Image (cartoon, grey):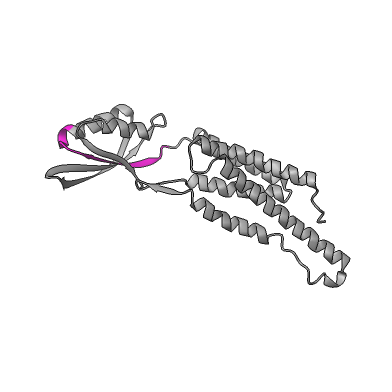
Amino acid sequence: MNVAVTLPEIIIRLLLSVITASVIGFDREHKNRPAGIKTHVLVCVGACIIALIQKKIGFDALQIALAKPRLAGVVRADEARLIAQVVSGIGFLGAGTILVQHRTILGLTTAASLWAVAGVGLAFGMGDYSIGIAGSIVVIVVLVFSKKLINIHPMKKLEIEYKHKVETKEFINDYFTKQGITVVNVDFKVRQAMNNIVYVNIYDIEMPRSIDYASVIEDLSMNKNVVEVQLVSI
């Protein structure tokens, strides 16, 4: 039976939303992502408040129907209506965290985490503590421990522009060999720049987990013949 949510119950649900969203947001902020603790907390708490309002609407509709049976067929409350708006509306906020830099897409995980904390907030707001707590644990595990639990060597495209073909190509190949970087495929292009010939190699590479992409780009760019190095989206 639908019952009124008391003030202590409201406070508990809001506090749970704040605590779980803070943990999830900390991971995003620690990794310098677009949305951090405050954004995740506000999204989760906002979803929780909307769910609490939906519960209140449902309770009020039930009370009116009990007090005035003749209106029972007229006064209705759909418990999924406001929740559905949260699920669809949070996508606009998530889209704002997705960035495209140098043809590389960033922020997809943060957008997904915002969508997930909205679901957690809805669960707490509706009083489904087991779903909210279990969902929070799963989100935290995925964000914090997924790279440690799942060993994946993602393939990346590395575009290198350079001069002096033979000398620089030998340097690049030697560097990849020393770092344990596997070249899966490579495309070659040649273009004219300021009356000079510039060679462009686009490498499909697989890197060991111990190596950082930023370090590879910095190391390669230190060579005097390398004009530009950048990661490109596949």
Dividing the picture into quarters, in which one does residue 17 lie? top right
Seen in the image, is 228 located left or right of residue 79? left
Most distant residue in the top direction: 178
The span picked out in magenta is: 153-167
The residue positioned 43% from the left and 48% from the top of the image is: 99
The residue positioned 35% from the left and 48% from the top of the image is: 103
**164 within the magenta span:** yes
The x, y position of residue 105, in whole percent, is 41, 47
The residue positioned 70% from the left and 44% from the top of the image is: 14
The x, y position of residue 234, in whole percent, is 35, 48
Most distant residue in the left direction: 195
The residue positioned 20% from the left and 31% from the top of the image is: 224
Seen in the image, is 18 located left or right of residue 158? right
In the foreground, 21 or 186: 21
The x, y position of residue 37, in whole percent, is 57, 40
Position of the N terminus, as image quadrant, is bottom right
| Looking at the image, residue 176 lies above or below residue 192 | above
Looking at the rendered structure, the number of numbered marks drawn on it comes to: 0
The x, y position of residue 71, in whole percent, is 83, 71
Can residue 124 be seen in this snapshot?
yes
Seen in the image, is 225 located left or right of residue 153? left
**12 within the magenta span:** no
| Looking at the image, residue 46 lies above or below residue 155 | below
In the foreground, 203 or 99: 99
| Looking at the image, residue 137 lies above or below residue 56 | above
Can residue 176 be seen in this snapshot?
no
